[in-house]
Amino acid sequence: MPETRDSIVIGAGIIGAATALGLARKGRKPLVIDRLPAAGYGSTGGSCAIIRPYYSTVDGSAIAYESHFYWKDWEKFLGAADERGLARYVDCGCLVMKTQGNGMLAHALELMAAIGAPAENLDQAGLLAKLPIVDTRCFGPAKRPEDEGFGEPTVGEIQGAVFFPTGGYITDPQLATHNLQRAAEANGAEFRFNCEVTEIRRAGGRVAGVTLADGTVIDAPVVVNIAGPHSAKVNAMAGVEQGMRIKTRALRHEVAHVPSPEGFDFEHDGMVCSDNDVSTYCRPEMGNYVLIGSEDPECDEREWVDPDDFDRNFSEQWRVMVMRLAQRYPGLGIPNQTKGVVELYDVSDDWIPIYDTSDLPGFYMGVGTSGNQFKNAPIAGEMMAELIEACEAGRDHDKDPVTFRLKHIGREVSIGFYSRLREVNPESSFSVLG
Ligand SMILES: Cc1cc2nc3c(=O)[nH]c(=O)nc-3n(C[C@H](O)[C@H](O)[C@H](O)COP(=O)(O)OP(=O)(O)OC[C@H]3O[C@@H](n4cnc5c(N)ncnc54)[C@H](O)[C@@H]3O)c2cc1C
């Protein structure tokens, strides 16, 4: 007799573990299956884990702002102990440069006003008071090192920035995932590692369960694809891709860790910074380091890859990102030794995730997190559980979308915003900014 479960979650990353917790709190006993040896060892482990409220859409911003309150009171949200300790939220705030390219952040300020999130509109003196190491000259649009004028100032100066106090970063994204695993287990979930799902089985017009690489068959009426950069492969196994207007694919990304600029304690006096003039973002990293990521300027080629076959070594991109940020922080050195992360984003066509059901009854997906959903994981887990229970009770979410209440900020969102059937959202930044 095959093993039988009431639900299976494929993937023990931050979104999978949060969904398991959400389902367990609704009374299920989900089995979470991951091909890796522990929770958070996939793309979550390489996450910059930045928490920030600004997105390009009002729903995206509202959910991201709401997430701040979950992380702020992480222990209470989890309601369960972890022998490894709890992940730490450093809420140092986020500073975003005002540039012509981002419309001097007028839209972001409107969105923050609409959702009631605090935002301090700073002039250049205010920006320098927050971060005195900044060189305010403009360098954009971003160039490649081989282009003429790379690293040389262009026209004008950065006139100011917006500071978002309800943001920062989680020091250890893997530990945060382990925290969720322990909380889910305390509520009846089970995690199984080193097991790869190779088949999604159907019977009687709905999902029937999964088969593992070693031939083990597990039956379940509910199967949830939260396979991160492997999401398209798992959707292909389920045969649901043709019923999706929005698709996903894996994008390779590098993150650099370099020592703080000479004479400045970025770990304690720095903050999350996003700078579209030099097309980088950064945040403090332990050991008085600066963690640097790319905002994907048009001059850089995007590396779409097979998640089972990509180069985990640093490339020229590592040095390019550091050189770009060094334009803004002139004291930043460019070390010879590369340190940081090479990982994959699971990118949807409009860089907005898909939290949805599918054309195969009982098969659900939390995918396409596009390099920007770590922060939202606790809410994504609750939304997925709400959606699954509603659909299993007979609701047609495609026609009558389930709504979700953001309890801390007192707002309701439609989970239909994340539908696989949506048209590409033209309001998106079509970048990691979401
Ligand atoms: C470099 C980088 C920086 C980022 N920075 C930020 C940030 O600053 N802020 C933010 O909010 N977000 C950020 N993100 C995005 C965020 O980290 C992701 O959205 C999130 O971690 C995705 O979690 P997940 O659980 O969906 O996927 P994953 O963590 O990738 O988990 C998926 C799991 O599924 C497993 N799996 C896949 N296929 C199978 C199979 N067939 N059988 C069994 N198991 C399988 C994998 O082993 C994996 O463990 C970043 C992402 C990256 C890569």
Image (spheres, grey):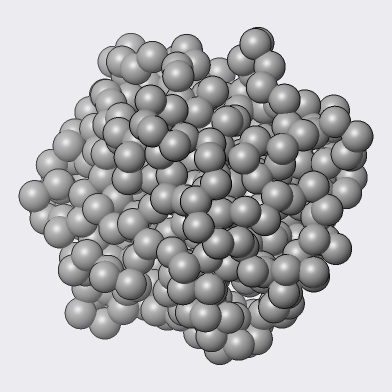
Q: Nearer the viewer, residue 66 or 214?
A: 66
Q: Nearer the viewer, residue 216 or 47?
A: 47
Residue 10 in sight in this render: no
Q: Would residue 352 be found to the left or right of residue 80 on screen?
A: left
Residue 364 against residue 293 in the figure, above or below: below
Q: Would residue 363 be found to the left or right of residue 129 on screen?
A: left
Q: Would residue 182 be found to the left or right of residue 13 on screen?
A: right
Residue 117 in sight in this render: yes
The tally of labels here is: 0
Quadrant the C terminus occupies: bottom left
Quadrant the N terminus occupies: top left
Q: What residue is drawn where x is 22% and y is 73%?
A: 398
Q: What residue is drawn where x is 45% and y is 17%?
A: 315
Q: Would residue 411 be found to the left or right of residue 333 on screen?
A: left
Residue 384: percent from left, percent from top: 44, 60
Residue 50 against residue 299 in the figure, above or below: below
Residue 308: percent from left, percent from top: 32, 18
Q: Quadrant of residue 86?
A: top right
Residue 75 against residue 56 in the figure, above or below: above
Q: Quadrant of residue 260?
A: top right
Q: What residue is drawn where x is 56% and y is 18%?
A: 37
Q: What residue is drawn where x is 48% and y is 79%?
A: 107
